Image (cartoon, coloured by chain):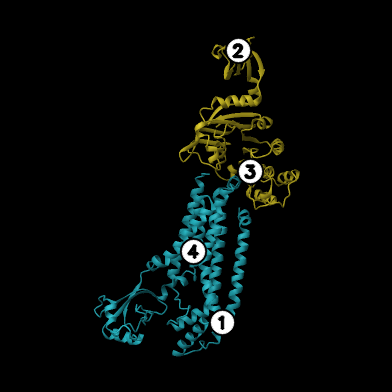
């Protein structure tokens, strides 16, 4: 376990009855980043994050979070903030009750931060959480997760159920919250545009496997779209890793990864967007994860 | 943690408090009149046979009202049903609802361990359940005290609804400390079934089915085996066998307030005999003719050398039996709470 990683797994697996939601997953998520975890439905994102919070116990392998076992005692729980999918809150409890809940259940509770956030977001303290909009519920849940002053904040599809405006506001708010605290963040999403806005590190998970991982800037700098007259990708010079290739009758378009410059003048080089990059890696593994795709819905 | 538990539980707790208050007012108002009736009945300061007459008169006159038998039976019903309601509405949804609304993901990711969360929920709600049920029982015992005292003095049956021995199925489970055990068990059962099903509604149905079965099985099949019974052989006259054909003993000579578990007719040698054959010789051969009254029948049977062998628990076994039965239910409640903890710590969600 290196001190610079917040989540480290080795051969991690989780089985629901007979179906493996996550299997043989080995990865290391570095500290000090806002890490985006992307992948198709059924890639095991939620399962991985649930294992990291200790809500689930692994069937196989090991997982360490901030160097400890997930949910192993109050101290470990205090170090990890978690925002579950769809931001569950107690429908019968008011906004103020949720803040009291946080204060009673977390010794490190930052009451000023919580109160300030709720005021800034213009939430009615006496309103029952059950009557809040999806965006407001997510804000309450995020307030609970950040005001406990965690070292690591885990968010599972935090914006999936929000409308575009609420999504933008939530992510903006998340950015501000994490900038104020020295906080590592891991969030999962299948909405790459959203991740692009907030993440500086990206992990593409397909079928429990890490397809690609790295700082966003570095990923963008080392991936290029090449287009030129049609030719066999196998004839390309060394040092180029072809991620995806598409052909028309006369033209070939390649997404390649390379650390050096592309010198062949036959190719027209252009930059690649994060979305195209991620999609290219996801379709690379498309065949593999089909068997477990239905798991997301089942859970 | 206690704050959250209380915050989630307080509406139910206040509802229970209101129900207790209504029950208390009903009992206080009618109980006052009941005590007055007892004071005016002449039982206090009675002597010998006068006591029997006075108590029978008191109970029969009570039985002829509509109010007192109704409250008497309502009280028993409330105390028997209260644990079931608690198991259904407090126990079953306690954790199942957290799964349904997925709020467990919120609760279990605060800086409090899952076991402390569970312990606070089970302890606060469970102890309240026990307190509420026992409070119902104590209030009811206060109300019915004149009736029980009169019944114990009068000994023989009066033909009213008040003819319940302290060991009877209805009385034993509603008096003493057994309501504590039933409440704890029903609540823990609901919670455990809720943890198993993760959905409140099916958990409520299963909890009700299991608890109702336990409430029936306990008095019918289990309670009489919890303590070794005593056995005695006596005349039919001495046990005041009832004359409705079964010739079942109604009292154990020298042991008032006993629980008669079983009886059998025997001959003087102590060998079992067929009761029908024995009693047939004492009835007139014409089935249309009126049979002998009880004392005549007893005299006839006793004169022919028949006796009745009675197995019973004496009145002194009442409290040991209360402790054993309550202990069994408390132990079951602890086992069920342990199951909840074990199941949640396996962290399957």
Q: Which numbered disc covers residue A87?
A: 3
Q: Which numbered disc covers residue A250?
A: 2
Chain to which mark 3 belongs: A
Colour that chain B carries in the picture: cyan
- What is the spatial separation of the Cα atoms under label 3 and label 4, in whole angstroms? 38 Å
User: Visible in this render: residue A290?
Assistant: yes
Chain to which mark 4 belongs: B
Q: In x, y percent, where is residue A233?
A: 56, 14
Label 4, residues with CA under 10 Å away: few <14, some 14-19, many ≥20: many
- Helix, strand or loop at label 2? It is loop
The chain painted yellow is: A
- What is the spatial separation of the Cα atoms under label 4 and label 1, in whole angstroms? 29 Å
User: Visible in this render: residue A68?
Assistant: no
Chain to which mark 2 belongs: A
Looking at the image, which residue is at 44% across and 62% down?
A: B214
**Of labels 1 and 2, the one closer to you:** 2
> Which numbered disc flags the more N-terminal residue, 2 or 3?
3
Label 3, residues with CA under 10 Å away: few <14, some 14-19, many ≥20: many
Label 2, residues with CA under 10 Å away: few <14, some 14-19, many ≥20: few
């Amino acid at each position: 376990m290196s001190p610079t990683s917040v989540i480290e797994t080795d051969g991690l697996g989780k089985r629901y009855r007979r179906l493996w939601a996550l299997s043989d997953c080995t990865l290391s998520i570095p500290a000090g980043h806002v890490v985006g975890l992307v992948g198709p439905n059924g890639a095991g994102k939620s399962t991985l994050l649930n294992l990291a919070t200790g809500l689930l116990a692994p069937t196989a392998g090991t997982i360490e979070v901030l160097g400890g076992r997930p949910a192993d005692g109050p101290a470990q729980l205090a170090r990890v903030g978690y925002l579950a999918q769809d931001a569950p809150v107690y429908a019968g409890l008011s906004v103020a009750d949720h803040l009291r809940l946080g204060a009673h259940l977390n010794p490190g509770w930052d009451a000023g931060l919580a109160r300030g956030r709720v005021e800034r977001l213009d939430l009615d303290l006496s309103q029952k959480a059950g009557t809040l909009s999806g965006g407001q519920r997510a804000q309450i849940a995020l307030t609970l997760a950040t005001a406990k002053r965690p070292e690591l904040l885990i968010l599972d599809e935090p914006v999936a159920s929000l409308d575009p405006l609420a999504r933008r506001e939530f992510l903006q708010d998340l950015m501000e919250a994490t900038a104020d605290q020295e906080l590592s963040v891991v969030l999962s999403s299948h909405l790459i545009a959203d991740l692009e806005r907030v993440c500086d590190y990206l992990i593409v998970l397909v079928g429990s496997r890490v397809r690609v991982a790295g700082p966003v800037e570095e990923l963008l700098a080392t991936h290029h779209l090449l287009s030129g007259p049609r030719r066999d990708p196998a004839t390309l010079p060394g040092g180029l890793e072809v991620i995806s290739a598409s052909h028309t009758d006369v033209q070939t378009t390649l997404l390649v990864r390379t650390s050096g410059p592309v010198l062949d003048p036959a190719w027209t080089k252009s930059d690649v967007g994060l979305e195209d990059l991620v999609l290219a890696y996801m379709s690379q593994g498309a065949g593999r994860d089909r068997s477990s795709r239905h798991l997301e819905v089942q859970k | 943690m206690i704050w959250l538990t209380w915050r989630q539980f307080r509406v139910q707790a206040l509802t229970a408090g209101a129900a207790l208050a209504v029950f208390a007012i009903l009992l206080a108002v009618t109980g006052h009149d009941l005590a007055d009736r007892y004071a005016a009945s002449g039982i206090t300061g009675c002597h010998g046979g006068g006591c029997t007459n006075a108590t029978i008169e008191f109970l029969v006159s009570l039985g002829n009202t509509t109010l007192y038998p109704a409250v008497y039976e309502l009280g028993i019903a409330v105390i028997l049903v209260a644990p079931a309601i608690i198991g259904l509405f407090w126990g079953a949804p306690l954790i199942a609802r957290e799964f349904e609304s997925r709020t467990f993901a919120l609760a279990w990711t605060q800086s409090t361990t899952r076991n402390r969360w569970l312990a606070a929920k089970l302890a606060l709600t469970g102890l309240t359940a026990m307190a509420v049920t026992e409070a119902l029982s104590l209030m009811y015992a206060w109300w019915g005290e004149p009736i029980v005292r009169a019944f114990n003095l009068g000994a023989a049956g009066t033909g009213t609804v008040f003819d319940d021995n302290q060991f009877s199925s209805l009385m034993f489970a509603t008096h003493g400390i057994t309501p504590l055990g039933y409440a704890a068990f029903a609540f823990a059962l609901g919670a455990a079934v809720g943890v198993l099903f993760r959905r409140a509604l099916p958990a409520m149905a299963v909890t009700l089915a299991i608890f109702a079965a336990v409430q029936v099985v306990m008095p019918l099949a289990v309670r009489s085996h919890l303590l070794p019974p005593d056995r005695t052989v006596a005349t039919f006259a001495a046990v005041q066998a009832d004359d409705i054909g079964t010739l079942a003993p109604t009292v154990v000579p020298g042991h008032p307030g006993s629980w008669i578990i079983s009886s059998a007719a025997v001959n003087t040698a102590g060998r079992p005999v067929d009761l029908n054959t024995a009693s047939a010789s004492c009835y007139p051969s014409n089935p249309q003719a009126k049979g002998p009254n009880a004392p005549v029948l007893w005299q006839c049977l006793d004169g022919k050398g028949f006796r009745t062998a009675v197995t019973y628990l004496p009145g002194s076994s009442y409290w040991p039996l209360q402790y054993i039965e309550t202990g069994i239910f408390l132990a079951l409640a602890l086992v069920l709470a342990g199951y909840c903890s074990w199941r949640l710590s396996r962290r399957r969600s």
